[in-house]
Image: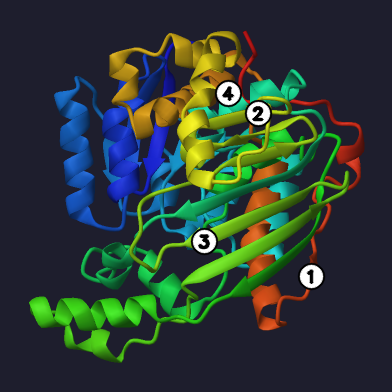
Amino acid sequence: MSKVKLAVIGLGCRGFSVLKYVLLKIKDAEIVSVCDVYEDRIDRALNTIKEAGGEAKGFTDYKEALNVAGIQGVCIFTSWQMHSEISTYAMEKGIPVGSEVGCEFSLEGCFDVVKTQERTKTPYMFVENCCYGKDELLATNMARKGLFGSIVHCSGSYSHDLREEVVFGKENRHYRFDNYVNRNCDNYPTHELGPIAKLLNINRGNRIVAVSSMASKAMGMHEYVEKIGKEKEIPAYLYNTEFKQGDIIDTLIKCANGETIRLKLDTNLPRQYSRDFTVRGTKGLYEQATNTVYLDGDCKEEIWEPAKFYREFLDSAKKYEDEYLPKIWREISEEDKKAGHGGMDYFAYNAFVDCIKNKKPMPIDVYDGAVWMAVSVLSEQSIIQGGAAQYMPDFTAGKWMTRPSLDVIDWE
């Protein structure tokens, strides 16, 4: 196989960014078909591909875009509501799927994707870029080598001030607006959950068995509308818009092997960006917020002042990089660093293309995608029921007990 011919469906902010800065940089990829419901986005994408020396056809119907002869893979960047529908259609046609992350809206939707993949055997990758993050891979390798002992708990957060993006969603044609108006759940759990699930071997010797969520009241968006309304003219309908999405969503997850996971969605209030990836084991911890590795015995005596502790251990993870940081991050080029989220996007989509080209198993497969997306569904049900634990279906039908471990990279 020469270059892998790709279709790109969804050309909004995320889709266009990955097309321009990632997919067009992958030497084994060629974009031959693009699709969006908006003509101006199609024109922008086609012009960008042409400027890069390529040529593609543009469509407003994803089915027509996937009927272009010779397509060998599709990258899906549409609204969350369309990911599963387009994925199942592509798999029915035998086109390998690279689905951008997001939530699902029903367990039936998750099962549809799984059953379609199992029946058609078409490759499917849930392209969670944070599974390729520098911090996440460093900590995972250290955990694999036993430095943290037995892992008992992990936590993470999608903490990102999205108030402007959500509030002006209608004007900017962004799908998040309708979700924040109509739902109350952990609507975007996979950035923090994906790396944790890989570290804990979820679906490969372990699985998630229960999900419980609580939501704070929803005040952030309402007060943000009032604030900006005093500073500039905004659409009148925003003053009467009720956002159901709670400002903080806390989710607790129980695993079959006994570990617990804590997730937090925090997008409606002023704050800095953070994934707050944390690993706790019987011999030590990794904490992303301060880039700290603390192993049992590192302190000769207990430090009672948190500020003093972090002054001593801030960025202590750096001293472990030479031995435990994967080769892809030790040898990352300046060009790759520019290809989305510091290089994570390039590693993720390059893996998708490489798996198609060389017929390798997808490192983040349909079972991973189904479970991670289902957390949104179960968190919504749990919040409605006052935090009651919700049972996670076994999408593998028991195969999780014997499936071999598969990380997103080969440890080198």
- For mark 2, give the secondary structure: loop
Decide: is 168 above or below 30: below
The residue that mark 2 highlights is 299
Mark positioned earlier in the residue sequence (3 or 4): 4
Decide: is 154 above or below 341: below
Residue plotted at (31% across, 52% down): 36
Q: Which mark is residue 18?
A: none
Mark 3 residue type: Leu
Q: Are marks 2 and 4 in contact (CB under 8 Å)?
A: no
Mark positioned earlier in the residue sequence (1 or 3): 3
**Residues at marks 3 and 4, CA–CA distance in whole angstroms:** 24 Å
The residue that mark 3 highlights is 265
Q: Residue furthest front?
A: 301
**Residues at marks 1 and 3, CA–CA distance in whole angstroms:** 18 Å
Residue plotted at (58% across, 26% down): 137
Q: Quadrant of residue 18?
A: top left
The residue that mark 4 highlights is 138
Q: Is residue 276 left or right of residue 295?
A: left
Dot 3, crowdedness within 10 Å: few (<14), some or many (≥20)? many
Q: Is residue 322 left or right of residue 75?
A: right
Q: Which mark is residue 389?
A: 1
Q: Nearer the viewer, mark 2 or mark 4?
A: 2
**Residues at marks 4 and 1, CA–CA distance in whole angstroms:** 32 Å
- For mark 3, give the secondary structure: strand
